[in-house]
Amino acid sequence: MLVLLAGACARQTSASDSDAVEIERLCFVPATSIQLFSGVSVETARPLLVSAFEITRGEWRAYTGSPGVTLDPLLREVQEGWPESSDDLPASFCTLSEARAFAQSRGMRLPSAGEWLAIAVGSAGSPYPWGTSDVLSVANSLDLALLEPMPVGSFERGRTHSGIYDLSGNVAEWVEGSLDPQSPLAWAMGGSYLRRKARLYEPREGLAGIQHVELDPEHRAIDVGARLVADPREYLLRCEAELARIPRARERLFAVGRRFGAAAVPVLEAVAQERPESEALQWLLEGARS
């Protein structure tokens, strides 16, 4: 069985979860503001839906095979070298503008640098995505000396409390803007399999202590990819009719709502009031309230 939702609500391609639709691979992150150290605060000004996983090669391959998508020859050459068995690996070698175009094709976007960091540190401002202490074998970093990407979501113990994987290691992730208004360069955040695992931020080092690399927006690298975020209201209003038609929709959307949790209830209530006839939104809300 394949579940396929058209356009911006498309099925996520993953050998580990071939029947999943996109909403089942999104996490709810409440609005939050955290002061990490003197002079540096980060926030998600509004709640976000965040991809649990980095963009995969399978998703990228499907996107670049769509009508109207033109590939840069350098990217095409690299992509043609990806075996189909690698569809669960994170996509890489895209420029910032190419990652942005992919996000827009899904009706989503890249997170800002501040949003990315707020998502990674969580409401507690933790120095690692998984918590307060360094732990062995929780991220695909150079410390493991694998020297290659791993399937997204491989490191269960490295995920955030919201259920987001690989915010440390695997591939670095393009973000919009930076935390340094003086820098003309773009940021990619989260480290990679070619970099040592590090804290998300070091207060004593200021902006230089925030884990990131500064790159030309047109830079390409085998260890730089991206992940997506979306506004919950916009996403749900766009997709609710299609969500209601997936197999076992009530059961699956109830489970998604339950995973989103009580923090998502106000958002889901507001959206459900806008579309009172929508069963899909009611099932999500029931799950979040349970």
Image (cartoon, helix red, strand yellow):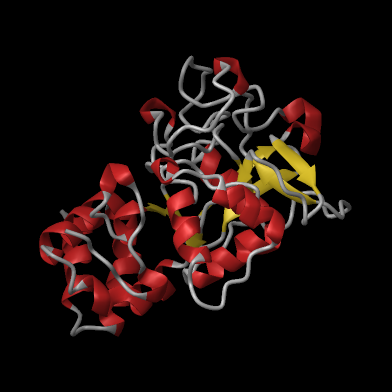
Using the image as rendered, state which of residue 111 and residue 85 is in the foreground: 85
Occupied quadrant, residue 23: bottom left
Using the image as rendered, state which of residue 65 and residue 48 is in the foreground: 65
Q: Is residue 162 left or right of residue 147?
A: left
Using the image as rendered, state which of residue 11 and residue 155 is in the foreground: 11
Q: Residue placed at 45% from the left, 54% from the top?
A: 50
- Is residue 175 at least partly visible in the picture? no
Using the image as rendered, state which of residue 85 and residue 51 is in the foreground: 85
Q: Is residue 28 left or right of residue 283?
A: right
Q: Position of residue 72 (x, y in %)?
A: 69, 62
- Is residue 181 at least partly visible in the picture? yes
Quarter in which the N terminus is drawn: bottom left
Q: Residue placed at 38% from the left, 52% from the top?
A: 27
Up-down relation of residue 161 to residue 185 (above or below): above
Q: Residue placed at 57% from the left, 72% from the top?
A: 69
Q: Position of residue 152 (x, y in %)?
A: 43, 39
Total marks in image: 0
Q: Residue placed at 25% from the left, 79% from the top?
A: 241
Q: Position of residue 36 (x, y in %)?
A: 65, 38
